[in-house]
Amino acid sequence: MSTETPTVATRAVAARGRPRRTQLSEGARAERRLGWLLCAPAVIVMIAVTAYPVGYAIYLSLQRYNLELPTAIKFVGLSNYGAVLASSYWWHALEVTVIITIFSVAISLVLGMLLALLMHRTLFGRGTVRTAALIPYGIVTVAAAYGWQYAWTPGQGYLSAAFNYSAPLTSEVKAIAVIIVAEIWKTTPFIGLLLLAGLSLVPDDLQRAAKVDGATAWQRFMRITLPLMKPAILVALLFRTLDSFRIFDNIYILTGGNNGTGSVSILGYDNLFNALNLGIGSAISILIFIGVAIIAVVFIKGFGTAAPGTDLRKR
Amino acid sequence: MAAVTTTARQKAGWTTANLVVIALALIPVLWLVSLSFKTPTAVVDPSFLPKQWTWSNYFGSTGILRTSQFIRPLINSIGIGLIATLIAVVLASMAAYAIARLQFPGKGVLIGMALLIAMFPQISLVTPMFSIERAIGLFNTWPGLIIPYVAFGLPLGIYTLSAFFREIPWELEKAAKVDGATPFQAFTKVIAPLAAPGMVTTAILVFLFCWNEFLFAISLTSTIASRTAPASIAYFSGSSQFTVPTGPIAAAAVVITIPIIIFVVFFQRRIVAGLTSGAVKG
């Protein structure tokens, strides 16, 4: 669904790029064949692992299919979707997911921008800052999540001790805040590095000219840097929003989804491995897939985000 | 004189900001390290540093490096990560070469497909993959994890590598063809060596993804025969039902963080170049 835009556009541009190729020479035909041959293995693996299982998930989602009741498997149409959409668990999980996504993406975008500006402007220890920033990006989410969990455990953690021996992970709102902090810590470096790349595309001349004309640093940032960085910001936003919407690891370790902190991915997982309900679990999977597709379409169509790989079309 | 003081003050400002960033990035990691060196009785001690340092969480009788419950998953993680990375980089190199260098219809479809998979919610695959892998005997095996890891490593690899491949000078390939090389020879003899740095970068990014992956790792495995290290930590159990093995969990978390730190310290530039090449360019 979400690929339609880049695909169609790519074709159009590719066609425009080489208008004179009406008859294929022997060489062009060989090139074509080689192109397909080289892409085939990647395409086969990607289809085998995604398209086929998604098709199967759609099929499963239309069945009453509980692993504990293997004899009761039956085609039930859309009633699994009805059950999910009528359930307060789904809407609560969706609400939690959306809240985590909005807060973690918005805050890490602002902090990531500050980090990018710092890495761009600083003259001292740039390499050290970059290396340090890459550690949260690279660290195994689960490992970091255990660190956060123990840090917030009363009597055990330094953060809990610093905040009056509080136990935030046992209350819904505070636990969600802890999850958001853990997400921000992990993802800000990624945004910072993407924005740093965007920042390096802003010409210094323009900044200097504006400075000569008397623009303040804030004005230069708002009027020059931000508009020129819009494409980079949108790509970073798209990636992070989709990633955040799929949040699983941090919640699984930090709260296990207890106290109403479960995301939609946690809900889907629980329906499969705790309730052993493949039918309902698949319906949730498909609904999450639709959610992701909507986000992607809104970003690409609505905000005009250049899909990653846009640069491929220019050649 | 005024200029000098401003510069000095600016320098101090930037240095402070740098130090803040470094501290924020490292404190949660140092906390894990500190936890892993605390004695089992010190789990009720909320101070940041251990009062008494011990290696027992690593090498003690219940230490993680002396139990197959962690060693085996660690081997699984390394093996599955390396094999998946190798396959993904080889397949992605082929596809990226075609995208960067050749004209053929369907290129846009491929790019779109890679984009779709990069955005794919993994949870949507977990239910059907669980079912399919159980039916065909891949559940709880290395290939059962390698296959999805390759599939999700491929989009990353294709984007990063095609960006790198486009930086390679065309003329060399043409020269090779003039000298009588076939397109395939031009690929293996001329372009591949030039592309090696990009391939190393891509391999690091794909390996980091496999090393980090958790959802498939807990869903598509059931024993330490194929469970990876991050998943195994979630299954650590204490000496009784009521004790949480904080020390061993922290030690295991530190062990799986060590390779990341090594990658980040030695390949910082490559990782940054790889991360940004595929995603942001104009």
Image (cartoon, rainbow, N blue to C red):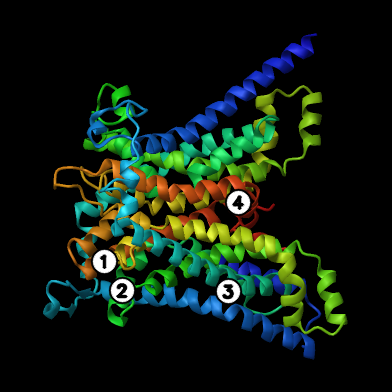
N-term-proximal mark, 4 vs 2:
2
Q: Chain of mark 1?
A: B
In which chain is the residue bearing label 4? B
- Secondary structure under tag 2 reads loop
Gap in angstroms between the C-alphas marked 3 and 2: 24 Å
Residue that appears at 50% across and 40% down: A188
Dots 2, 1 in contact, CB < 8 A? yes
Residue at the image position 68 percent from the left and 53 percent from the top: B281
Q: Amino acid at mark 3?
A: Leu
Q: Are marks 1 and 4 in contact (CB under 8 Å)?
A: no
- Marks 4,3: beta carbons within 8 A: no
Q: Which mark is residue B139?
A: 2
Towards the viewer: B179 or A97: B179
> Whole-percent x and y of residue A152?
29, 33
Same subunit under labels 3 and 2?
Answer: yes
Q: Nearer the viewer, residue B252 or A88?
A: B252
* Residue B28, image quadrant: top left
Spatial CA distance of label 4 from label 3 is 20 Å
- Looking at the rendered structure, the kind of residue marked 4 is Ile
The chain under label 3 reads B
| Whether labels 2 and 1 share one chain | yes
Residue annotated with mark 4: B271
Neighbour tally class for label 4: few under 14, some 14-19, many 20 plus, Cα within 10 Å: many
- Mark earlier in primary sequence (3, 2): 3
Q: Are marks 4 and 3 on the same chain?
A: yes
Disc on res. B91: 3
Note whether A282 is above or below A27 in the view shown: above
Which one is earlier in the sequence, the residue at label 3 or at label 1? 3
Crowdedness of circle 3 by 10 Å Cα count: few (<14), some, many (20+)? many
For mark 2, does the 10 Å Cα neighbourhood hold few (<14), some (14 to 19), or many (20 or more) residues? many
The residue type indicated by label 1 comes to Ser
State which tag comes first along the sequence, 4 or 3: 3
